[in-house]
Image: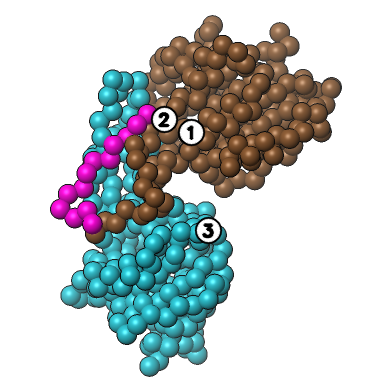
Chain colours: A brown, B cyan
Amino acid sequence: MIAEAIETALKGVTHIDGIKPDMPLAGKRVLVTAGPTREPLDPVRYLSNHSSGKQGFAIAKSMAELGADVTLVAGPVNLPSPLGVTRIDVETADEMLQATEAALPSDVFISVAAVADWRPAARADKKVKKAKLQGGLPPLELVENPDILKTLCQKTSDRPTLIIGFAAETNDVIEHAKAKRLRKGCDWIVANDVSGDVMGGDHNRMIIVTETGETEWPRLTKQESADKLAQSIADYFKA
Amino acid sequence: MIAEAIETALKGVTHIDGIKPDMPLAGKRVLVTAGPTREPLDPVRYLSNHSSGKQGFAIAKSMAELGADVTLVAGPVNLPSPLGVTRIDVETADEMLQATEAALPSDVFISVAAVADWRPAARADKKVKKAKLQGGLPPLELVENPDILKTLCQKTSDRPTLIIGFAAETNDVIEHAKAKRLRKGCDWIVANDVSGDVMGGDHNRMIIVTETGETEWPRLTKQESADKLAQSIADYFKA
């Protein structure tokens, strides 16, 4: 079902309106993930992460405005699709990985989604009745989800030229972001301090961590930060 | 913080615009819970339920339109407040119970919220790092959340005259609803078959289970179902 949706969504998008030859990212394929994933325990319950999807959607918009051919793989969010962007909606990390891999090859991969690290080991077909569990609730067995960022970084063929991960941290932001860049094998990490009101809010402060060091940007709206990131990506390809 | 918000929200609402003497529910205090609850594992992860909040918000609107003085305790949803309704936003089941009890006394309690049955036993102050857990993820210990519906049903003082619970079921809908009515000690149960597209959708089919039997309503919009339920409640108080 997901595979079909992807095929339908991607059909014929290679050479339509998206490509504007005079734009800095014209001809570049860009893949963005955004929003949370939801990992079901049963038909009504799930494990998830706080993520409004705003930052990822803003980046998809900025990249499209610079002429890129953007595919946006989105978890469950309440946001309209940015103009000119091909959007694929998914729910779980597994579905997000599948949709992301299906959208390759891509020149740039920007992993903004707050992918759930773990999912319930078992998924019940019917709602688990609390009444039946009285006298002792078994602990919830969790298994690790696929690591979408790392999976794409480690690809031997079709690895995007520029892979940018996001790190939402509540403490030791830069230190964690540097470690994450090396651990995942990605090119840049955009670090966000989410200890304040960033999650769901309209502002943030990005710190860009690359091989050569880190750059802190001022507090901006998420759209302004997105525009700045898109411009940095354009500069990277121009250099 | 929650307690203060409730106090502020409720201050002076007893005798403002809400009471229209010519309306069937004029002078009645009605308490509605709606939406999901979110039960945090750490600052970024949580356990939740599928619930758009649409049905509960529609019911709050319908009750207010019949002249009731409505307090709506809402979990995290993306919905505007119905006109004339006092809204209190909460996140967890514990907060929802606290806000609900603080809003008593009430003539009617309609428990539409999809309250999480369980929450993580521990809540980490900092984001749990996946990297630190390699080599074995401990199962997630869950503890039972307070049962808001049952708690209000069992109150010896301040028990609302009419308590209506909701049962979202994926199978054996009526059987489960009847059992739930007895188990919780509530007056009516509104049963919903959520095996289809009800969750997040705009339509549903309500089955009203009372002491004397059950009544199935046709497939309606959630607002139409809400209007019909509000009318049934008005009839109950008129009888």
The verdict on a common chain for dots 1 and 3 is no
Q: Mark 1 and 2 residues: CB-CB less than 8 Å, in contact?
A: yes
Give me the disc on residue B21: none
Q: Amino acid at mark 2?
A: Asn
Task: Report the residue at 50% width, 90% height from top.
Answer: B22
Determine the secondary structure under disc 3: loop
Q: Is residue A136 magenta?
A: yes
Q: Residues within 10 Å of mark 1 (few under 14, many from 20)?
A: some
Q: Amino acid at mark 1?
A: Asp
Task: Report the residue at 58% width, 32% height from top.
Answer: A99
| Label 2: chain letter | A
**Dominant secondary structure, magenta:** loop
Near-viewer residue (A4 or B233): A4
Q: Which residues are magenta?
A: A132-144
Mark 2–mark 3 distance (CA, rounded to whole Å):
27 Å
Q: Is residue B40 magenta?
A: no
Mark 1–mark 3 distance (CA, rounded to whole Å):
22 Å
The answer to which image quadrant residue B80 occupies is bottom right
Determine the secondary structure under disc 2: loop
In the rendered image, the residue lying farthest to the left is A135
Residue for badge 1: A94
